[in-house]
Image (cartoon, helix red, strand yellow):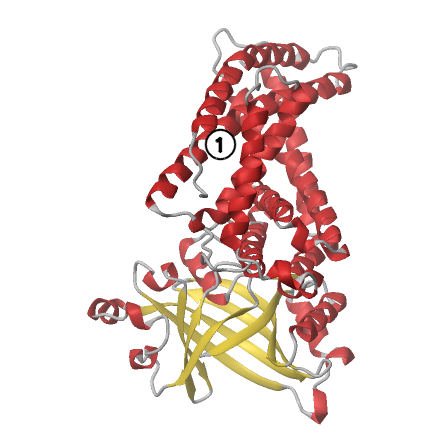
Amino acid sequence: MGTETEIKFQVSPGDLQKLAVSRNLRPSGGQLAEHEHIVSTYFDTPDHILKRNGISLRVRQAGKKRIQTIKTVANGAAVARGEWETRIDGDEPDLRAARGTPLQRLVSKRLKRDLDAVFSTHVHRTLVPLRPGNSRVELALDEGHVRAGLHSSPLAEVELELKNGSIGDLFRTARLIAKLVPAKVTLKAKSQQGYDLIANQRTASVSAAKISLPPRATLQTAFQTIGRSILHHIAANEPAVSAGLPEGMHQMRVGVRRLRAALWVFSDMLRSEQTESIRKDLKWLAGKLGAVRDLDVFLTTRLKRLEASDPPITGLGDLVAELEYRRAVAAEATKVAIASARYRLLILNMLEWIEDGAWLKLRPTLRQQKIKPFAARLFNRRIAKAKKRARGIREINVQDRHDLRIALKKLRYAIYFFESLFQGGASRRALVKHKDCFGSLQDSLGALNDIAVHQRMIVRLRKDIAQRKSNPAPFAADAVMGLERSETRKLLDTAEKAACKLHKAEAFWR
C-alpha cells in the first residue's frame, strides 16, 4: 500500500498557464517539466457499490502504459489516503490485483459481472518536480474534462503531491500557489466529480456525514477526524451557496456551527494564536450565512404559510416582496464572500490547521489522552449543568433562555461527534433518549429564538419603510408579530416537558 499525500486546487485555465510559466515554480535540479495526455476510466456497478464503500477503481492510460489504481476515498478533508497501483495489460480492471486492498472484500461473482466503466477523465498534464526545503513535491497542472456518456464538465486543477519530506513543506508550496493565482482548495476527488456529473448534482447541497471514532482514539486523532469531516461538509456546499440555494446556505452554516462547537469541545488542546485566527474567520463566515438563513426561515416557515390565510392578511404580499428582496441582497453578499480571497485562504488555513497546526506541537500529554473517558467527563459535567438550567425554563429571562439554547446546541453537536463511542445496548438506548430530549428542547427554544429574531427584523423593516406612506407591509408585519407572540406559551409548554424528560434520562456515557 502507498499513501498519497496531496493538496488540490481548482483554478481557471488561464491561471494554469500562469503557473506553468512562473519563475517561482521552475523544476528543481536542472530537471525539465514533463507533459503527457492521460485518459482515466473509472469503474463501478450500476448501483455504485464502490462509491458507497468509499473506494474508487480506475484504469489510467498514458501512452502505451495501463495503470490500475485503487484508492480509498476519504470521507473528509484528509490530505493523505490509501493508494494501490498495479501495471496491467488491458483496458479492463484486473481484480486479482485487488488482493490486500479494501476492494478485496467486495469482490464477488456479482461484482465481476456488473462492473463497468461509469465515466472518464481526459487530461493534459504538466508535471513539475519541486524541492521546497528538504522535501520533494510534484506539481501537476491538469487541464481537460470529465465525461459521462453524452455529458461533460471542464476540469482545471493543480495537484501538489508530497513525494518525500515534511507536510509543512507541502503546505508552504500550497501557499505559494495561492499567492500566485486565486486558487481555491478543492476537497473533491476527480472520481466524485464524475459521480456528480452522472447524477447531475454539481450544485446540490451536501449533508454532514456520520463520524465514526475508534474507542481507543486519542484526542488528537479524534479532533482531526471530526475536523476533516466538518471541513469537507463546509467546502462541499460551496457550489450550492454560489448558486444561491437555500439548503446549501443552511448546510454550510451548520458546518460552520459544528466546527465552532468542536473548538469549544477541544478548547484546552487547541489553544494557540492560529486557532484564534480560525475562530475569527469562522465568526465572519457565520455572519454572512446567518443573515440569509434568518430570512429564509422567516419566509418559508412563517410568511409563505400565511399567504393562504382566510381572510387574507392586508399587506402580506408587500411584506413578502420586501423580505425576498432583502434575502436576495444578503444571498448576493454571501456569494461575494465565498468568492473572496478571505474565504479561499480560510479553507487552506483550516486544512493546514487540522493537519499541521501549531496545536500539534503543544500539550503532548493532553493530545494523547483517550477520547472516550474525555467525552464521558464532558457529558457528565455539561449535561448536569444543562439539566439544572433547564428546570426553570419558563421563569428564566429571554437572554438566559438564549444562552441555554446555545449550550444545548453545543452539547447536541458534541453528541454527534462522539455517539459512535457509546453504542452498547443500554448506552445506545439512553443515547437515543438524550438525542430525542435535546432535539425537542432545542426545537422549542429555536422556535422561540426565531420569534425574537423576527421581531427585531420587523422593527428594523418598519423603520426602513416608515417614509413609504402607501406601503401596507407594516400592517402585515404587526399581524405576524401578534401571531408569533401568541405561540410563545405553547412553545414554552413543549420545552418544559422536554426539560422534564431530559432530567429523568439516564446517563449514556457511564
Which of the two residues, 436 or 23, is positioned nearer the viewer here?
436
- Residue that sits furthest to the top in the current view: 311
Q: Is residue 480 above or below residue 374?
A: above
Residue at x 61% of width, y 24% of height: 449
Residue bearing the label numbered 1: 438
Left or right for 426, reference 502: left
Which of the two residues, 201 or 206, is positioned nearer the viewer here?
206
Q: Is residue 33 above or below residue 225?
A: below
User: Percent position (x, y) of residue 338?
Assistant: 67, 49
Q: Is residue 123 visible?
A: yes
Residue at x 71% of width, y 88% of height: 28
User: Percent position (x, y) of residue 258?
Assistant: 58, 45
- Residue that sits furthest to the left in the current view: 109
Tag 1 secondary structure: helix
Residue at x 41% of width, y 58% of height: 198
Looking at the rendered image, the quarter that the N terminus falls into is bottom left
Left or right for 66, reference 345: left
Q: Is residue 107 above or below residue 49?
A: below
| Mark 1, other Cα within 10 Å: few <14 / some 14–19 / many ≥20 | many
Amino acid carrying mark 1 in the image: Phe
Q: Is residue 295 visible?
A: no
Q: Total marks drawn?
A: 1
User: Percent position (x, y) of residue 191?
Assistant: 46, 65
